[in-house]
Image (cartoon, rainbow, N blue to C red):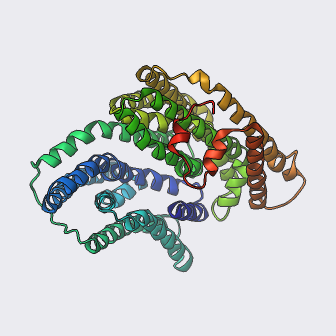
Amino acid sequence: MLSRVAGLAREMAYSYFFGTGPLLSAFVIAFMIPNLARRLFGEGALSAAFIPVFARTLKDDSNERAVRLAGGVLSLLGVVLLALIVAAEGSLLLSNAIHPSLAVRLTAIMLPFMWVICFAALLGGILNTLGHFAAPAVSPVILNVFVLVTLIVGGKWFGLTDIPLVYAVSVSVLAAGAGQVVLQLIALRRARFPLRLNRDWKQPGIREIIALMAPMIVGVSTVQINSLIDKLFAWFFVADGHGPAVLNYAQFLYQLPLGVFGISVATAIFPMLAGLAADKDWKGMTRSVERGMTLGWFIALPATVGLYLIAHPLVVALYQDGEFKESSSARVALCVQFYALGLGAYFIQHIFIRAFYALNDSRVPARVSVICVFIDLPVNFMLVIPFGEAGVAFSTAVSAVIQTVWLALLLKRRLPSADYAGLATSLFKTTVAAAVMGLVVWLVVSDAGLAGRTNWHPAILVAIAVTLGCTAIYAAARALRIPELAELLERRSGMTPTALSGPASD
């Protein structure tokens, strides 16, 4: 949560100093390249494959074997990433010599970030396995703080603007990556875990990790590649160069409820699904999946309605200042609305993916993700030309819906007892409650409602709309006796095994 708050402050600073102009768009494109490597080699597939093997080695073998495994993986990661960086830097220098581009130069500056951030992520995985969570948890905040301080000090105290300021921010990204590595190293030293690099890359643990991460890397990469493709479409086909920056602001807002609630539901349900699958309790697993769906829908649909209705005043309240003009607010708000249309699909998609992982099947979600990327390409092309970056946002939402429906049909084959029609009552009640909430929020923020009769600041309107909207959804859910409300308000444990594995009609 602290990282989300710091990230919001960072985005607000971006909006003040850069607006939605081509400078920020170039920075967004440049940062996505090392960020993709972080997802793949750092906290993504490599960490997911490394942690179980490292934990087993630490438990079953000697501590020396675990130290050797960690050192071997880190040294191999360093060599691979160094080779990639050297090759990519050469290509970028050649590309910039032929066709000078700010985005290419910024990419060249920030490319080494992928080396340090992947090290930091893997060190964080070691710490988590050792039972130390503070340093890895606070690590993402460092990047947001470094960027924020650079913008304030550089922009306000030293008067940097435009290209010099964006260069300074790019350098601060590298410094933040180094700071994250130092933080993890200090925590490892306090945990009394020695870090000794070695070149024993043939040890069995490393081979197992590589075998495990091969199918995972496809599924993880497609999500990030799809996001990169979206921004590239906006970069090349939106003539004023504002497209990637507009999408970046909008993505941050719609991902807030997904990151805080959607991933939490999927994470909480995953161990239970894995246990039920191991016991071959298919009926119990089916009930748990269906319960996760209803809970995800209960959170996602009101979030969709609310975010769609308050998009414009929310964007104005958070971003509209400095270089961020009124025209930019309208563009970002429209993208937020289109992204929000897919919020329910994003929530439920994570539950389906965890169900396949519990069944030891990472290939089906990966294959579906890859195919959906190719579906997204022509849809992006058809929509970006007439509708600009908003067409890209709508295409992403459509792709998410297709992917979720497809996964649901494939999962039903694996769990024949699944009866999605039986969810109709629960989903209908949530839809009615969200409609009641939507009416209340609309009466606050619409021109026909409170917003049309007062000159209050958009932040006040958003605060009133959110407060009354939450009250309305709570009252409607209580009146309709929606069981998901009780699950969310359970004080002892937010989602109990009994609740999640109980009948969907409870």
- Between 431 and 307, the one lying in front of the other is 431
Q: Residue at x 57, y 51 (%)?
A: 256
From the viewer's perspective, tell me whether residue 75 is left or right of residue 358: left
Q: Residue furthest bottom?
A: 157
Can residue 388 be seen here? The reply is no
State the residue in front, 361 or 73.
361
Give the residue drawn at x 57%, y 61%.
8
- Residue 459 falls in image quadrant: bottom right
For the C terminus, which image quadrant?
top right
Residue beneath the point at 75% across and 37% down? 480
Residue 445: % across, % down: 80, 49
Kindly tell me whether residue 306 is visible in this rendering. Answer: yes
Q: In this orientation, which residue lies closer to the viewer: 59 or 309?
A: 59
Residue at the extreme right: 453
Q: Quadrant of residue 189?
A: bottom left
Residue 485: give x, y in percent of width and height: 66, 44
Question: Can you give x and y, in whole percent of width and height, for residue 433 in the image?
Answer: 74, 38
Residue at image coords 29%, 57% = 122
Query: Residue 483, relative to residue 202: is it above or below?
Result: above
From the viewer's perspective, is residue 302 above or below residue 14?
A: above
Number of residue marks: 0
In the picture, measured across the screen, residue 373 lies left or right of residue 127, that is right
Q: Position of residue 411 (x, y in %)?
A: 44, 25
Residue sitting nearer the eye, 174 or 397: 397
